[in-house]
């Protein structure tokens, strides 16, 4: 079985159309295809105002393979796993209607590599605060009382 890989994205803010990464709609509702959730280790997204915090995110993920050589070795296995964990975090944030993960951290807690058995096992923990953010330019143009 071939390893599944996902594209990595920059954690810098991508302000487009006034909403960071095209996040949730103005009503705070669901996401559209092509939307991007930014992952930042900071308590804010630079150039943006936090409109709402949607709660904490905590993911514990385990991945195991018995075909390590086919996946490109232990380095490729761990890299693909971290990228998949980031995509899962983005999907969970987006499902809540958010477009940013504040205080994001991913910790690769355990990696077991048995080269003679062509086996590897890894455990990762991702945690963040789900949030809805808007660019400062758009946030300042909203009428008072309509900032929700």
Image (spheres, rainbow, N blue to C red):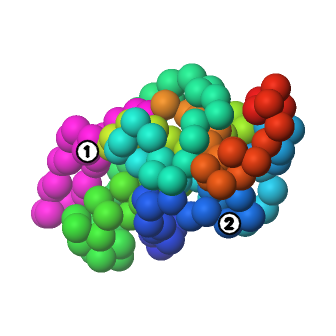
Residue 108 drawn in magenta:
yes
Relative placement, left or right, of 40 versus 146 is left
Question: Image point 72% across, 38% down: which residue?
Answer: 97
Question: Image point 61% across, 63% down: which residue?
Answer: 15
Relative placement, left or right, of 98 versus 108 is right
Relative to 132, residue 10 above or below: below
Query: In the rendered view of the protein, which quadrant contains the C terminus?
Result: top right
Q: Name the residue carrying label 2.
A: 16
Where residue 37 is drawn, which disc sits there? none
The image quarter containing residue 17 is: bottom right
Q: Secondary structure at mark 2?
A: strand
Residue nearest the viewer, comparing 13 with 99 = 13
Question: Image point 15% across, 56% down: which residue?
Answer: 114
Q: Position of residue 69 (x, y in %)?
A: 28, 74
User: Dot 1: within a 10 Å radius of its alpha carbon, few (fewer than 14), some, or many (20 or more) residues?
Assistant: some
Relative to 7, residue 47 above or below: above
Q: Earlier in the sequence, mark 1 or mark 2?
A: 2
Q: Which residues are magenta?
A: 107-128
Residue 72 drawn in magenta:
no
Residue nearest the viewer, comparing 66 with 92 = 92
Residue nearest the viewer, comparing 9 with 22 = 22
Question: Image point 21% across, 41% down: which residue?
Answer: 110
Where residue 108 is drawn, which disc sits there? 1
Mark 1 to mark 2: distance in Å?
32 Å
Relative placement, left or right, of 118 versus 55 is left
The image quarter containing residue 42 is: top left
**For the stretch drawn in magenta, what is the main secondary structure?**
strand
Q: Position of residue 8 (x, y in %)?
A: 45, 68
Q: Is residue 126 shown to the viewer in this render?
A: no
Q: Secondary structure at mark 1?
A: strand
Relative to 64, residue 95 above or below: above
């Amino acid at each position: 079985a071939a390893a599944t890989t996902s594209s990595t994205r920059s954690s810098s803010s991508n302000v487009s159309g006034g909403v960071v990464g095209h996040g949730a709609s103005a009503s705070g509702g669901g996401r559209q295809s092509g939307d991007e959730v930014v992952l930042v280790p900071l308590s804010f997204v630079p150039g943006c105002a936090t409109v709402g915090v949607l709660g904490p995110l905590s993911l514990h993920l385990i991945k195991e393979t018995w075909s390590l050589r086919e996946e490109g070795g232990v380095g490729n296995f761990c890299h693909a796993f971290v990228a998949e964990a980031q995509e899962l975090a983005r999907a969970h944030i987006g499902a809540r209607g958010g477009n940013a993960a504040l205080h994001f951290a991913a910790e690769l807690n355990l990696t077991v590599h048995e080269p003679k058995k062509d086996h590897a096992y890894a455990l990762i923990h991702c945690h963040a605060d789900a949030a809805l953010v808007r660019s400062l330019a758009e946030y300042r143009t909203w009428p008072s009382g309509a900032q929700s």
